[in-house]
Amino acid sequence: DFAAGSQQHNLQHSRFLATALLPGLKSGISPLHAVRGGMEKGALRHDERQLAALHKLERLHSELQTYTPPPMPPPPEAAGKKEWRGPQFDEYGTPVAGGTMYTGVGDKSAAPTGFFAQLGAMFGGGSAKKPPAEPQIDNVAAPRGVYMYGGVGCGKSFVMDTFFLCAPVAEERKKRLHFNEFMLDVHKRMHELRMKQPDFGDPLPLVAHDIASSTQLLCFDEFQVTDVADALVMRRLFRHLFSYGLVMVATSNRAPDKLYLNGIQRQSFLPFIADLKARCEVHDLESQTDYRMLAQVSRGARTYLHPLGEGTTKQLDALFADLTAGHRVSAQTLQLRGREVQVPVAGVGVARFSFSQLCGRPLGAEDYLGIASAFHTVFVENVPQLTLNEVNQVRRLITLVDAFYDKRVRLFISAAVPMEQLFSPTGAAPAAGHGDLIGTAAYVPNASDEVFAFDRTLSRLKEMSSHEYLGRTAGSGERSSATFMLYANDSVLSPEKALALFKAYDVDASGALELAEVKLLMEDLCETRKGHRNVLDEEVQQAFDLMDVDGSGDVTPYEFVEIFANSKLANVQVLEFGDTLPDEVTAQRPARAGRVSRAI
């Protein structure tokens, strides 16, 4: 297999679920008939949207039964075995080989050596032959795959796994992978090939040939693109794979047109979207049922836990671990218009706060709506019994529940008392300094105002804990309507750490970083973040240009610290954007900052 690692357990678990619910799944049988049979027997919930997706996959299943892949052509030859052709670009303008002065991509040959030959190599020249054309996919005879997208927990993976197990393709010729692991393996292969054969040239065609030689059907779970290196590679990689007749099935949370939204150099990624639509039938799974959450409910999970104590904490820990299983969790920062909200721990759309962090600080409706837009599930821990002595906390909790309810966020709470006793209208009457729900001090409410408002909150909390509410999927359009940016806190460097990093990579102790030292830095950072050292030369050059503010040809400590410690978009790992970037982010965004953030 191409991939192994942190996602392997999830893949095995998902496949086990399909076989457990539908015993007897095997290559050749109809996935649609298998699922219909499970629904008729009561083993599966009837879901018309899943059946609609299975109709698409049934078409592919039928076509695969009669499809014979064409013979594979010979693998691409090393560039060193071909006549040198000078500067070469693919049809999208990406440098492939040739003069380093123009493209940054060297191309050695058996041409005569010497000063003029070297000068020619820098500026391009040699044979007038055109570089190899991009492979064509217009006349590919392979069946079109299926790209399914929909909200969290709507059953995409289950539907795909059922198809995968039934697909009439030899076991060794079909593979089911997590997409991030697949791309990680591609980068590793490219890097290893460059290290073993520096004169080979572009390693991507050979890697694509190797994949297509052993694989007829690729099924990807969680197809998403957030990394600029992946985005730049994918267009050419999948153009080669599709041209060889490889069939792809994928699940995703995003429609094709929203892949890599707001990404750096997205224009270069757009041709891949066109290829994806050409080679895959796109289907919106639109299921309003969250089967992942229903599985939790069916196992007795509750959304409101009391009293506080070790047992309650363990239950929340288990729920959080299950909902984020196989994914990295960390402290994150949610950047809204003009301010930031700290998220103590979060991962894969699930956030965890204490009550004091959300309601003990001066947060308002916009903050809570921002949280609801960034996370589909929120844990709020250690909620005390509230009285009029904590009137501000009461009002913030009311606002929080209203915002989460409107955005259909799943809310888990641990509290000191039962839900009906959460607010007790006792204690001192609120003073004028408390203000009111709209932030004025002129209006001083009495206890009946809070009692009336909190009755609505209790009603909503009860509905939010219901089976029907938990089974619904938060619509992507609803969640992404806010303006926000989310990034991992541990990707931000302090000025002291940035200076220490500079000194560590100033190998010649010259007091400035040269291009080779910046490349070493980016390779090390890329390996730490992504698990591979495949950093493109153009990425290194653009990162160097970004850091070399004065254009002197090297990077001073001041320039380095300014970029790595003070310009947030240049040093954070951006996890998610709203559909529209915050104005202040757009204003401060360096033109090439994404080149650095990719590696860090």
Image (cartoon, helix red, strand yellow):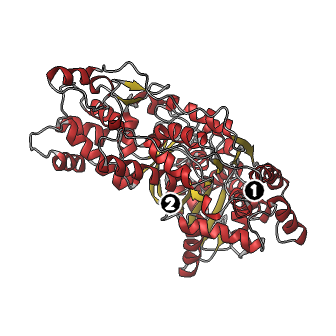
Foreground pick, 363 / 67: 67
Secondary structure under the numbered disc 1 in the rendered image: loop
Q: Quadrant of residue 388?
A: bottom right
Dot 1: few (<14), some (14–19), or many (≥20) neighbours within 10 Å? many
Q: Where is residue 523 in the image (x, y as percent from the top left)?
A: 30, 48
Residue 3 got which mark?
Answer: 2
Foreground pick, 474 / 383: 474
Left or right of residue 346: residue 521: left
- Front tag of 1 and 2: 2
- 1 over 287 or under it: above or below: below
Q: What residue type is labelled 1?
A: Arg
Whether residue 126 is visible, yes or no, is: yes
Residue 43 got which mark?
Answer: none
Residue 472 got which mark?
Answer: 1
Q: What residue type is labelled 2?
A: Ala
Give the alpha-carbon distance from disc 1 to disc 2, as whole Å.
32 Å
- The residue under the point 77% across, 49% down is 63
Q: Where is residue 588 in the image (x, y as percent from the top left)?
A: 39, 30
